[in-house]
Amino acid sequence: MLARDESPLHHTPLHALHVARGGKMVPFAGYEMPVQYAAGVLREHQHTRSAAGLFDVSHMGQLALRPKSGKVEDAALALERLVPQDIVAVAPGRQRYAQFTNPDGGILDDLMVANFGDHLFLVVNAACKAEDEAHLRAHLSDVCVIDSLADRALIALQGPKAESALAKFCADVGGMKFMDTGPRKVAGFDCFVSRSGYTGEDGFEISVPAEHTEALVTALLENSDVLPIGLGARDSLRLEAGLCLYGHDIDTTTSPVEGALEWSVQKSRRTGGARAGGFPGAENILGHFEKGAARRRVGLRPEGRAPVREGAVLFADSASAEPIGKVTSGGFGPSLNAPVAMGYLPSQLAAAGTQVFAEVRGQRLPLQVAPMPFVPNTYKR
């Protein structure tokens, strides 16, 4: 019997497959999801780096913005009211990373935006998808029809053998470059395929009609190069890649500049650009570009073997009583055989090589600020 304040966990279309393959199921963003399989997190992580890992990311939200005018440029201009990115410049068949911002310049969610030629296709985070849809409807309904694509699942195939595994079912994926996207037939099913992912590895994300998901995944898993991968290895892979987890490394209190995401804001939206500002929090965000932000997300390498986890408080030295920041993500990096972390520090302490200390179980452990990604990415440019 559920307590009054608990809701039943949702299941993705692959739930039965996860259970049948020995997935250890845990609650995540309102869904029951596999944290690992029998192989374990370490082997799943290493397999993704050396071959191909298959991830169920069907808990993510998928949305279509369909311009009422029939011109995709109108949908792009409308979306620019809500994000600091240049959406107009996203060519058909391409996609771009973006953030919804609030009036203070904080990040409501991060998302992917694809141009499908006659409409925009968005992928948003699971925990934010209801709020994101409401946000879009409140602000863009004058220009766009907003469709929630709840009848679609989403899987990710990541790793150096992802292309060869997927090419058996979709011959033209070999011609795709990083961030190429669009409708493709995969094993005869009408899918949307993007060459992107959340691991730092080359790979693909595939949106597939829910009723065909298990058949497609079963076919992919017949290839010995492909293993199912759970949330545990997904987290260690994205941490090694220096990628943000929404609600941890970025949130409503962090601006894109504080989050070290300046690269995602094109010059056209910055001061002096063709369409500068016009998005929520523009004054604060553009102010951070011009004058700098007081703090910054950085990579951290603990000097010992002990992982430094999320929430650990950071200090300038081993004796100081005054905290200077905190760790937002941390764990063991299997590819490096060493612990890695991310966190926020005052901007004047954000240079690579700076030593700081984290308090872990009453001890001060030394860390060094380090460049990210911790493991070089292998995107197909």
Image (cartoon, rainbow, N blue to C red):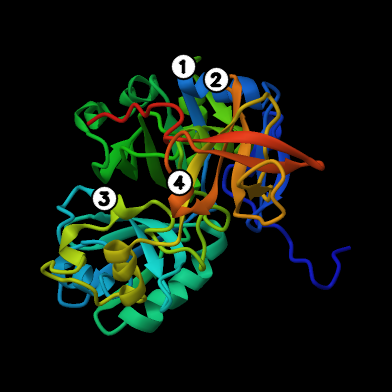
What element does badge 3 sit on? strand
| Mark 4: amino acid | Ala
Residue pictured at 36% horizontal, 27% vertical: 166
Q: Is residue 259 left or right of residue 327?
A: left
Q: Is residue 379 left or right of residue 132?
A: left
Q: Which disc is residue 350 wearing?
A: 4
User: Which residue is disc 3 drawn over?
Assistant: 95
User: Which residue is disc 2 drawn over?
Assistant: 46
Residue 8 location, x and y as percent?
74, 61
Estimate the spatial distance between the alpha carbons at disc 3 and disc 1, rounded to whole Å.
26 Å
Q: Is residue 333 visible in this depiction of the protein?
A: no
| Sequence-wise first label, 3 or 1 | 1
What element does badge 1 sit on? helix
| Mark 1: amino acid | Ser
Estimate the spatial distance between the alpha carbons at disc 1 and disc 4, rounded to whole Å.
32 Å
| Sequence-wise first label, 1 or 4 | 1
